Each structure stands twice: as structure tokens, then as C-alpha cells.
Amino acid sequence: MAAIFKPRANLNAKLTLLAAAALMLGGVGWWWGWPRTNYVRHTNWIVEQVVPFSHQHHVSGLGLDCRFCHTTVETQSNAGLPPTYTCMTCHSQIWTNAKILAPVRESLANDTPLVWHRINDLPDYVYFNHAIHIAKGIGCASCHGDVAHMPLMYKAKSLTMGFCLDCHSNPAPHLRPRDEVFNTGWHRTKDTPSPSALMAQYHLLNRKLTDCSICHR
Amino acid sequence: MPSVTRQWRSLAELARDPAFVARAAREFPTLAGSLNVPHDRRRVLKLMAAGLALAGLGGCDDGAPSGVLIPPVRSSRESVTRGSNLYATASVLCGYAAGVLVRHDAGRPIKVAGNPDHPASLGATDAIAQAEILGFYDPDRAAGLMRDGEPQDWQSLLTALAAQRASWTKTGGAGLRVLTGSVTSPTMARQFVALQQLYPEMRWHQWEPVSRDAVRAGAQLAFGRSLEIVPKLDVADVILALDSDLLDAAPGHVRLAHDFATRRNPTRGPMSRVYAVEPTPTLIGLAADHRFVAGPGDMHRTVVALRDALLHGAAPADGPPWVGEVVADLRAHRGRAFVHAGPQLPAETHALVHALNDVLGGRGTTYSLIDAVEVAPTNQAQSLHDLVADMQAGRVQSLVIIDSNPAFTAPGSLGFADALRRVPFSLALTVESNETSQRTRWSLPQAHPYEAWSDARAFDGTATILQPQAQPLYDGVAPHHLLALLAAPQAAAALDLVRQTWQPTFTGNADRQWHDALAGGIVPNTAAPPTDAKLLPAAGQATPPPPADNPVTLLFRPDPHLWDGRFANNAWLQELPRPLTKLTWDNPLLISPQQAHAMDVRNGDRVELRVGDTTLTVPAWIMPGQASDCAVVSFGFGRTVVGTVGQHTGWNVYPLTGRSEPPALRKGQGREELACAEHHNPIFSHDEDFARHGTLAAFTADPHFLADHKPTPALYRTKPPGPAEWGMSIDQNACIGCNACVVACMSENNIPVVGKQAVIREREMHWLRIDRYYEGDIADPTTLFQPVLCMHCEQAPCEIVCPVGATVHDSEGLNVMVYNRCVGTRFCSNNCPYKVRRFNYYEFAAQEHRPAAARNPDVTVRARGVMEKCTFCLQRIAAARIAADMENRPIGGNEVRTACQNACPTQAFTFGNMAQPDAEVLNRKRSPLTYALLSDQNTQPRVTYEAKITNPNKAIGREGA
């Protein structure tokens, strides 16, 4: 009677086992890794906008303060986008015929708002509030990255719940003195109060910022 | 602890029906019925695998930015892109205004709250005013101008009106009739005066189906002129309420409830004593210290006996046995006593009550009299009767109906709808398409009160200018604009008309004063001064007509929520359990237990109700505490031309009105399934003392007689105190069961309605419910109201059974529900002794009949398969926490007010941060009456109750002897 298994059967069996293991590992790896890619999280993606607005030019080039356009960032939950009128305070004087600014001029002339695509978005069950983060010394750059050097705007941080909780469970390293919040190029120096001093200054000691009810309602 | 009598919610519970007990003991009583499908092991495993595969997917969000951001072209000084703004206006029902503040979020109206500066509100509202915001967003609202059912453009109406005006000018307005409801608006008054000058032959008719004709006629009889009464219940020591609607629906009832409650808790001052005489329970009757059940015959004898005893000093001959003691008590409190009669009693009774009040000397203290707030008060039943007679006789050429629905609400015997066909030009201006607008030649969409300029007066005369909260959603026309169009082609806008009215009032800096009046919600110094009208001697001689000697008297009442039917398309109000019956979506005939026994009728059995030649087959519902010879039906249901929500709900009882024939009751065939919530969410206690109560005498002897035993040691660790400690105290002495809090909670927290069938399956979603307990004799039980919401237990039974940590405690003592973690095991609800958790069996929120923009953007809209419950208005806490943190200070003790607390007319709810010594809630919790619901469970709830104390007259026994 002929052998049931040919000599290659051994190899086939090993290869199959290896392939199965590889597939499983790969599957787990994909399951774990894929959602963490920048591609899925839309981080570092440049989103095309109606006007190719450059934060780099306006912030580090011209030295505009964040609050010049995002006026409600210190008082309300959302930072606010500038009305067309704000753009035209300058652009009625300079670059008045620039082609790329045509949508802005049309917006004012026709009284139709500019429509911008969202860059940073949070799920609807998260109730983020800009004002309190500013008041407690969290710099814009902590969540929005180095906006001053972005010619075109992109999402710089993952903004996942893990990202939020990293800071909420230990805010100390991220705190800045209140007057450095809008400073895009700020770095800790030897004159900066220590993280623990800032924690005390902002009354954050003994606070449990990881309660679900802090962000979810 | 004194012994307590048994408390029961439903008749089946009272009878200890074994089937009911078995059913109530189950967490999901309706589950058995839905598990009829046979399940083998294979199918169960398949379903479980599918469930596992889908679990968590709902919670995934890949963080992909979606949507767009649209900044305005110009920033406006007045608009804020995010955050809340409050704008004052008023909620007007039957002409009378109650001030409200509408909260806008991201530029759209979201939530109604009372206006603290308005005398008819004092910061509170009733259920109807709370629900008005849903009516504003109602997609069923009339969407366009129609003639004979065909869409028309605006110009065609203007052309038609021009032709009409030409003929009116020729005839002096003969044949022109305008029909409205009750009016207090000074602008409308001015417009009618102008119209009358222009067209001297024009006639203005008024009609409100919930009649106050007897009140008007009573004042005429007593004083010879139109007066209105302004009660001051906070100074009245003794109140006698005769079938009174003081707390239900009387003008200013929200304010009256507030004043009433200030005298009902013995820990906060001397208690008043309240006697109520009534055929069917009213809110003040249930709150009264003595409630005497009296059918029409007993009521008549009572009124006559009161007259003889108080006005003529005679010994009451024929009256009930308790009259003597009540009269003695009223006499003993001369100058501090007040008698009130409800609008259902005859005009002579009202005249007598004026005379009684005069003798009791309360004028100026317990009440005051002012000139009528209504414009041109009239006998509305007569007014409508005249109109229909003229229509039938062909004397009416043009009929303009403004915000009234006579084709539905006119008495059946009148035949309004038939008469309407004889009118060549008829026009109805209505907020939503209804029975009348379908029958008139022209139907015109009316601007919702939140879309139009107007003005109105409150029960004490205080005027409010109503400002629009948004541009008209459906091209609505303001009533003032239509009235102006009747006079001239170039009609002014409603805003200009209202401004013209107030031009003489605002002297000096008129713009400034106008803006102040708009912002404040009242026009200063417009409250009517008391009149010096003298009582006519004839008032004391009035004798009410003796009632017909019928075996059954049929009483008509407005539905407490749908009113006369105008709110039938409001799902919040439809599904709001009625204060007493806890019925939703239906209006059965309420009969007394004795009547039910005699007819062998159980709840839901059909009965045939015949009045004259009209027969109505309705289900019956047994109403404990109703006079044995009375049957009660409520208006508002059975609309035929109505939006999708109000269709096929209840029975129209208007055809039975306006008839003199005696009603006859007969048991009918079969049963009707009714959605009653009285037995839903049952709670169990060994002591059966759910709602504790006692008498003032017992309280004086030992103030702590109802308080809790000492706390027992807890099994689980007690959490350390946090930066804030949230707590609530509910005063049962104040709660009148009016349901304002329940609607406020729905509005604030995006709580969906589920529909009649789901209510029958016990799936209603109200986070806050008002449990109603009966105690004692079914013919005249003691009734207790107890609002129940999540207790935020320190030792929460729900938290320890959740397998996924979806319900957890936070550092501020809140029991928080994390929707995204919830996988819907419902273990928490099973383990909750208070039964306050609600489960989304379906995508209830998505099925709701309203646009997404109407929801509160600060509260998550819950998905299917998720448990939810009261959060103590977490969004308000969060807002206060952020505001306090930004100023580096702790949250104040009274800084956060929950939606229920804000809406409550009687301030039954007190909420606050107990970590702050100035918190009012701490004060309330220190009251000797404080107890925890189901304290034997040792859940250590953050919500506590103050037990109800009554102040009965020792001379009168429980039976009224």
C-alpha cells in the first residue's frame, strides 16, 4: 500500500501552521495597529479649503495673535472662526486683487458665508470646552500642534480619548504660565514655575479630572 | 415611627390581585409576551454571536473629521455663535400671559424657563408652557396659504381681501364677523376699536371652549361690572375651595401654586388650613387638609348652607354636617380667610362667594379685585350662539377666525360646521391645520407665538411684550398683521403695531424703555390697581339654581395637558401621565368606584354614554374620590384634522356639550386597551410607607416623628468627599403633582416619547416620574404625590452589578451613566430599588417627530440598547463647574438649578452643592421631616424627601362628621 503522506506533506503542514500563525499575528497586529495609523486618524492630513489659508504666514510671519481671529476661545466652549469681515479688515487694503482671495471678497459682496472643512473634530458625545483649558494654562499647541509653522492646516494630534486622558490624569507637565498660553514657540525655561507650583496655582491639586462626567454628559 | 396605613397606586394593587403581584415582581413584566418565538439552543447561540460581533461597533468613532464650519459674514453684536442666551417673552393661554425666558443655543430656541420677574411666573412655568417649544418645531404646522384646499400665493389673498374691504366699506362692515378666543392684548384691543370705527356694523365674537362665563357673570351679579379676582394665597390662613381650579388652570395658577405652597410646610412657618368641596379631584382638593366629596346636589346644599350661616347668621339647616365647623373656622379667621369657586359652578354661586369673601373681610389682604384684564369680557357661549344663528340666517358674509377652532370645539348641538358652509367668505388663521381651517374657504398659517410680535396681560394686569424668538419657520402671519389687513391694504407689521400701542407709555427715552421692557419681560407699573367697587346687596341674596335631579351628572373638564385640544399634536403633552389617573394618550370616562361597582365595570371596559340623541362609546376609568353620581370627561382628544401625533388619540366629547338632556350610562361591549402608567416601575418596601405623612398635631408633639432611623453600617466603602457634593431635597408638602417638572426634564435632557403601544409595554422614558399613592377608603382616599428620580445613592445598587462599568460614581457624588460603555444588560435596572432607570428598546430618539435642531445640544442623544436615567442635569453642573474653575473658586451652594427645580411652581425641589455651607439644600435636609425613600435598603440616597404634614381641623373627623 502506498504511503498516505508524501515526503512533502511534512513541509506543507509546517508551512500551513506557520502561515496560520503569521495570519493570526498579522491579523491581531492589523486589528491593533490599523486604527492607530495617521491614515485612519486623519492626522497630518492636509485638507483642501476654499481659501488656502496659511497659519504660518499669519502667525509666525505677521505675528497675529490666535485671538485676533478665534475671538471666543477664552470665554466659550468653541474657539470661533472669524467672520468674513475679519479677513476683510486687512484684505480690503492689501492683496485686494489676489486671485486666491476671490472667495473671500465674493463672500462679503454676496453676503454668503465661507464654508471651511473641519480639521479637528470630536465625537458628539464629547463636550470639549476651549475656555477652561485656556484658563488652566493649556497652550494651544498642546492639542493643535505647531500651528505657527503649518503653511496649510492639518490635524496634528490624534485627539483620541487616550490622548485626552494622558493629560487629564497628569496635567502637570502640560501646564504653562497663563501668559504663555498663546505663545506658539514657548519652551520651559529655568524661570518657569515648576509643574507642581503651576498645579497649585491653577487649583488642580486633589481634582479628579478623569471622572467620566468631566467630558461626557 | 407611627403605624402607617397601606399605600397603593392602582386598584389591582389594592385588591392584591395575585396576577398583578406576580407581574409587578418581575423586572420586565411585558417580556413574557415578546418571548413567544420558540428559541432552541442553536438560535440562541447564533443571536449571541451576532450580538457579540456588533457589540461596541456603535461606540466606534474613527475620528474622521466630518462636516463643515460656517462662520458668519459679519459678526453681530447680539448673536453669540455658541453658548446660551435668554430672551424674555410670555406663554399665553386663553389670553392670560405667564412670563417665560427662552434659552437659545447656537442661535436657536431650545428650552423654556419661567421669568422670575413676572408676577404670574416667579421663575416657574406649567407643563403646557414647557412643551410649547416642541410645538414651535412641530413639522406638522400649517405650511402654506390655501383656498378650498388649493395652495395659493400671497397676492391672491390680498386681492380677495381688497374686494372684501370694498364691500365692507360700502355696507359699514355689515356681515363682517371676527371670531377670536379670549383676548388681553392691548394691541389687539386697539385694533378692534379702530376696526369698529371703520366698520361700525362689524361684530367681534369670542369663544373659548373652557368656559369662564360663570366667573364673569358672577362678578357682574355681585358688583354690576366686570371684575377679576387676584387671590393672595400666601396670606390666607383658611381657604375654602369649592370645585376650584386655583392650582390647575385659573389665570395665574402658577403664581397661585407658589403662594399656596409657602404656607404648607410647618418647618418654614405657620400652616394654612384648606377645605375643598368638589365632585372630582382637583389639585387643590388633593393638597387640602379636608376634602369633601360633593356631587351637584351636595354642592348646592353646601353653598346654600354657607350663605345662610355666614351671611344671614342662620344655623345651617340642610347642609352637610361639617359646614358648621368650616363656617366657625372661617369666622375665627376673619380677614385672613378666602373662599374660591371654580368656573364650573353657576354664576349665582360666584356672586355668593364674592359676598362671602366680603363678609369674611379678606379684601385687600387675602384677595383684591381689579378691573377685568380681558378685553371686552362677554358671555362667550352666547357670543358663539349668536354668531351661529346669524350664519344660519345668512346674515354673515365674511367670517375671519383667528386662532380658534370652533368647528371642533363648538357645542355639538350648535352645528357650527354646517353653518360655516353658508358663509361666502371665510378665513381661518391657525398655527396648525385643524378642523376649522379645513372647512373655511381660506386657511392662512399663523405665526407661532414664538415667531410673532404681540403683547398680553397677566392675571393681575401686568403687561408683557411678546418678542419673536426666531424668523417664521413656515411663513406664518401674525394675528395683528391680519387684523390690520382687514382695515387697509398697506398693513403695518406686527412689530410696528405693538410699538405704536406702547408709544404713549414710554415717555422720555422711549427706545431705552422699549428695550428694557423686552429684556425684562414685563412693562413696568402695568399691574392693575385694586378697584373700589362696592358689593351690591343683591349678591348676598343670590340663590344658585338647584341642579337637575339626574342619576348621573356629566362634568366636562379641560384635559390638564391638551387643554381644549389645541395641544393635541404635542407628543410631550400626550405622553405625560395625567396628574391623577396617570393615563397617557387617551381620555376615558372617569366614573366613581360606586358607579363602577353598580354597573359591573372595570378599568378599560367600554360604556355607552348617551346624551339626547348623541351616543359615545368610551372606555371607563375608575376615579377614586369622585362623587358617586358624577361622571367626568375631558376635552382635547379625538381630533380628526390634526398632525401625525394627535391622530387616533382618545374620544371627542364636544358633541355631548351644550345639551340639556340628562346623560345616560350603559355598559357596552368589550374593552379598550389604555396606556396607564400608574402601576409602572413599582417599588417595594417592608413598611409600605413610601410617601410618609402625618398631622400637624403629631408634628408639634414630636417634630421628628417621621424621620429616619439611624443609618446602618454600609457594606461597601464610603467615598471620600469631593470638591462638590450634589444633593437634592424634595418637599412633599409643596408638590401638587402638576407635571411641570416632568416636561421640563424631557425638554432639557432630550428625552424621547415612545408612543401609546410602548407605554402599554411599560417602556416610557421619563427620567422623572411623579408617583401617586392612594391611602384609605377608595371612595375618598388620601392622595399623595411623590416625584421620583435617580436618587444618586452613595451605596448605589446599580453600580456593583454593571459588568462593563457603564454606571459609576464620580468624585462629586454623582451616579453617572456612561452611554458608550453600556451594552444593555439591564442588570442595573433590575437591581435599582427605585426603578428609575430607562432602557432604549428602540431607536426612540431617531423616531421622534421633530427636527434634530430642536434638541438640547448640550445633552447626548441616546442610541438604541442603551440605559439612561436622571443625571442631576449634569450639563448644568458642568457649565457651573467650568464657570467656577475659570474664576478659581468653588462652585456656589445654589449656583446650579436643575430643570425640574427651575420649572416647579411650588419650589418642591431644592438642589445644590452640599459642600458649601450656604446651600439651601442643606437647610432643607436639616428639616425634621426629612427621610429617605426606602431607607430600609440603606442605599444612602443623595435625594431625600420632606414628609407631608396636613393641618386638619380637630372638630371635623376623617369622615367629615
Image: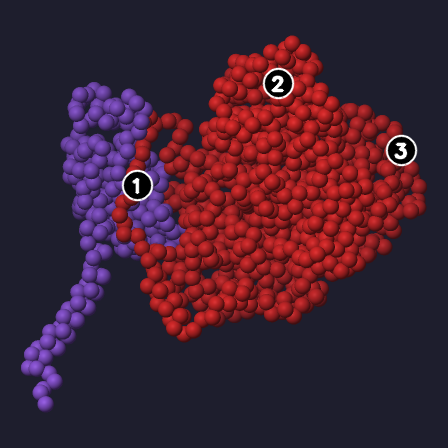
Chain colours: A purple, B red
Instruction: Give me the residue at 20% from left, 48% from top.
Output: A43
Q: Chain of mark 1?
A: B
- Packing grade of label 3 (10 A; few <14, some 14-19, many >=20) is some
Which amino acid does the dot numbered 2 rest on?
Gln
Instruction: Give me the residue at 79% from left, 27% from top.
Output: B220
Q: Nearer the viewer, mark 1 or mark 3?
A: 1
Closer to the camera in the image, B335 or B415: B415
Check if mark 1's residue and mark 2's residue have beta carbons within 8 Å: no
Q: Chain of mark 2?
A: B
Identify the image quadrant of residue B480: top right
Q: Which residue is mark 2?
A: B191
Whether residue B836 can be seen here: yes
Q: Which residue is mark 3?
A: B541
Check if mark 2's residue and mark 3's residue have beta carbons within 8 Å: no
Quadrant placement of the N terminus of chain B: bottom right
Residue B885 in picture, x, y percent from top left = 38, 45
Identify the image quadrant of residue B263: top right
First of labels 2, 3 by sequence position: 2
- Packing grade of label 2 (10 A; few <14, some 14-19, many >=20) is some
Q: Which residue is mark 1?
A: B67
Distance from Cα at disc 1 to Cα at disc 3:
75 Å
What residue occupies the far top of the structure in this picture?
A: B170
Q: State whether residue B284 is above or below residue B387.
A: below
Q: Chain of mark 3?
A: B
Residue B676 falls left or right of residue B862: right
Q: Nearer the viewer, mark 2 or mark 3?
A: 2
Instruction: Give me the residue at 84% from left, 46% from top.
Output: B550
